[in-house]
Amino acid sequence: MKPFQLIYTAEQSGLLREALEVWGISKRTLASVKYGGGQILVNGVEVTVRHPLQKGDAVTVIFPNETHGKGLIAEAGPLEIVYEDEALLIVEKPPMQNTIPSREHPFGSVANIVAKHFNDHGIPSTLHIATRLDRDTSGLVCIAKNRHIHHMISLQQQEKKMKRRYEALVHGRIDNSEFTITAPIGRKDTSIIEREVRADGQFAQTEVRVLALLEEYSHIRLQLNTGRTHQIRVHLTHIGHPLVGDDLYGGKRAEINRQALHCTELELVHPVSGKPLVFHSALNEDMQSLL
């Protein structure tokens, strides 16, 4: 399996270590390169991070091959690929499928099937899922093919350069056409699964825009500005409009057998080329039928 590698050009003289930091190579990634079988070359010659760079030097970082953890079983299964290159894999997750294996659902997850895809195509990577979705939630999932790429995407998420947009159906008619929910989220004292809005929780922010008012529901678009567990579900319940089908947080399942939530759009900057990328996904049939 050919290892993943990136080539940079030094824009000024200085220590290699400083240039690697500017290029976003984390200390953890650097340690994996140093001790895990990777290499750093300057003009084709292997060097250490203390090497003095000259402007125009070609720096090649060869990342060590990664292997799946023993707990992740590669499985054949349907995989709807939206986009794929040497760094990224964007897939469509259907409803009622885990993103990663769990105790209740150890098989058939996106991670299990992507592991098989990686094995079949000689991709030397473990699973780096950058945008995880709940089992019920459908839509776009972003997967990095390398520890460094995952780190670069995480930086984009922290700097709010990566946008995740969802569409949902909620109970009741929402009066405001556009607003922002800012409310801290933490684990509920009486549950290991549920979250709630609480004063000692982590900062969480969700932007909401109403697309249509139906007889009993509101069709809304949401953008996550933070990525807390169950953030959309908790925030919507907090304002009195739980997701249709989300019986954990007060929704009803009379007309749909899962929470009516779909990741319709992912916007990010490609971590290698710097090119802006936008991916779109249509609503699943069960949500379409409610509309």
Image (cartoon, grey):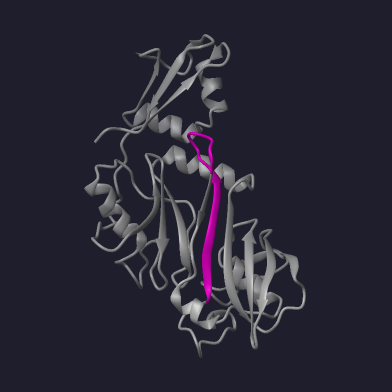
Residue at the outermost bottom position: 254
Figure check: 108 above or below 149: below
Give the extent of the magenta segment: 260-276
**123 with respect to 216 (left or right):** left
Figure check: 247 above or below 163: below
| Residue drawn at 24 percent across, 60 percent down | 75
Residue 30, given in percent of the width and then of the height, sits at: 45, 30
Residue at the outermost right position: 176
Residue 59, given in percent of the width and then of the height, sits at: 44, 19
75 in the magenta segment: no
**45 with respect to 166 (left or right):** left
Which image quadrant: the C terminus?
bottom right
Using the rendered view, name the quadrant where residue 194 is placed.
bottom right
Which image quadrant: the N terminus?
top left
> 211 or 168, which lies in front?
211
Q: Can the viewer see residue 196?
A: no
274 in the magenta segment: yes
Residue 161, given in percent of the width and then of the height, sits at: 62, 45
| Residue drawn at 47 percent across, 22 percent down | 8
Figure check: 138 above or below 249: above
**146 with respect to 221 (left or right):** left
Figure check: 42 above or below 154: above
> 15 or 188, which lies in front?
15
Residue 181, given in percent of the width and then of the height, sits at: 72, 66
Q: Can the viewer see residue 255?
A: yes
